[in-house]
Amino acid sequence: MARGKLIIVIGPTGSGKATLMRHATEHFPELGVLNSYTTRPRRPDHVENDHYRFVSVDEFKSMIDRGEFLEWAEFSGNYYGTRKQDVEECVANGKVIIKEMEVQGVRQLKGLLPKDDLITVFIDAGPWDGLVERALKRDHLSEEEIARRKARFDDEITFMPEADVIVHNGAGQREEADQAFEEVVAKAIAGS
Ligand code: 5GP
């Protein structure tokens, strides 16, 4: 059996990552979503909860000590990590799996997984000015939240030149973005 692949999705808040991923999983029933471990609290009524295993800080640290994580990172005061065994099982079983990740974790993965096992996809929703303008039309954001998102944007955007694929998802580009993302998944499925 051919090996599977891990598709990692990276992009700033508001880039539309979750929507593109949801669309892809609906379109490709064989596409799996990889679970993460996190110490952050569960958000009420959120679909994302399905893709996390919520653990205490002590449990997370024990998992680090036992070497169970392929990668882990501290982000916004919480721990996030990918379990080695989860990835190995999927890839060895020929499955294509998708996962959203912040940049510290992706950079670790790039050095750890065979090149053929990993595809990194950056979702580019255009420059910060447009992104923040759209976010402010949807929600009221405090100055503090805007500053936090800007810092994250500046950090995430540094990954764009390192990504295997860039999907453009600016204003009015949703359909093209869905299509471009579908192509990435279809290729990964066909090649595995
Ligand atoms: P949230 O708390 O909003 O669900 O996620 C915060 C950030 O953690 C997001 O950028 C998300 O992509 C990232 N993340 C989710 N799971 C993992 C993981 O297993 N490892 C790493 N490094 N980041 C993750």
Image: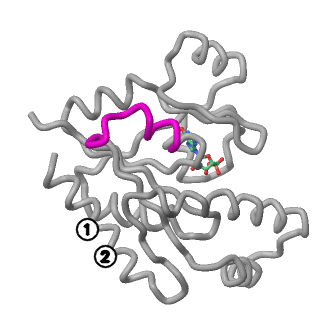
Q: CA distance from mark 2 to mark 1?
A: 6 Å
- Residue furthest to the left in view is 1
How is the structure coloured here?
Answer: one colour
Q: Is residue 65 left or right of residue 95?
A: right
Total count of labels: 2
Residue 71: x %, y % from top left: 52, 31
Name the residue: 64% across, 21% down. 60
Read off the residue under disc 2. Answer: 179
Q: Is residue 94 above or below residue 185?
A: above
Q: Which residues are magenta?
A: 106-117
Q: Which residue is mark 1?
A: 183
The reply to whether the magenta stretch includes residue 113 is yes
Quadrant in which the N terminus is drawn: top left
- Magenta stretch, main secondary structure, is helix
* Residue 106 versus residue 131 in the image, above or below: above
Picture coordinates of residue 75, whole percent (x, y): 70, 42
Identity of the residue furthest to the right in this view: 143
Residue 22: quarter of image: bottom left
As drawn, is 33 to the left or to the right of 4? right
Q: The disc labelled 1 sits on which kind of residue?
A: Glu
State if disc 1 and disc 2 touch (CB < 8 Å).
Answer: yes
The residue positioned farthest toward the top in the image shown: 66
- Judging depth in this view, the residue of 68 and 52 nearest the camera is 68
Identify which amino acid the numbered label 2 is placed on: Gln
- Ligand 1 is found in which quarter of the picture? top right
With 129 as the anchor, is 113 left or right in this view? left
